[in-house]
Amino acid sequence: MTAAPIRQMKKHVIVYGLVYGLCGGLLIVVLKLIEYRFLVVQHSVEIYGGLTALVFATLGIWLGLKLTRKEQIVVVKEVAVLATQPFALDEERLRELSITKRELEILELIAQGMSNREIAEKLFVSENTV
């Protein structure tokens, strides 16, 4: 055999291989399309019901969040306190309220203007405890 018929045979094999591959791919696409159509026709009510439920659930959640959202208003108000005399502890009122020594200690630190974090660090407790 010479080189020319071998090249021609290779060319035919490649062309027929491509045609065979394209036909196989086209057949697979047609079968998938038929399967898809069968699926859609057979279960169309369930598909449309699910899509409708998804749309209404999304709309309901969005509306619920939108309508129940409260606008946050931050009010900063400073009150001037005139201290004519130093702070004096009212023992009678303290017994009446039955405040523990630890609670009184925290209240004194609050009165000094300390934050919850600062109080927690000073007393070696968590912020939630304060």
Image: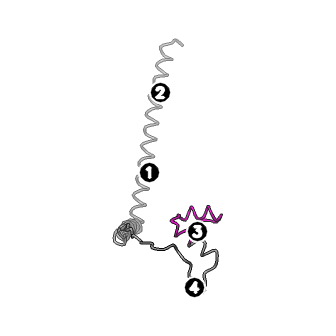
Check whether the beta carbons of the residues at disc 4 and disc 1 lie within 8 A of each other. Answer: no
Contact check, label 2 and label 4, Cβ < 8 Å? no
Tell me, for residue 128, which label it has, or none: 3
Residue 83's x, y, as percent? 45, 72
> Secondary structure under badge 3?
loop
Tell whether 75 sits left or right of 123. left
18 or 52, nearer to the observer: 52
Q: Are marks 2 and 3 in contact (CB under 8 Å)?
A: no
- The amino acid pointed to by label 1 is Leu
Magenta residues span: 108-130
Label 2 vs 4, first from the N-terminus:
2
**Outermost residue toward the front in this view:** 85
Give the label on residue 14, or none. Answer: 2
Name the residue type under label 4.
Leu
Of callouts 1 and 2, which one flags the residue occurring earlier in the amino acid sequence? 2
**Callout in the foreground (2, 4):** 4
State the residue in front, 68 or 15.
68
Label 4, label 1: how far apart the Cα atoms are: 83 Å
Q: CA distance from mark 2 to mark 3?
A: 77 Å
Image quarter of residue 103 = bottom right
| Disc 1 target residue | 31
Q: Is residue 116 magenta?
A: yes
Residue at which label 4 appears: 97
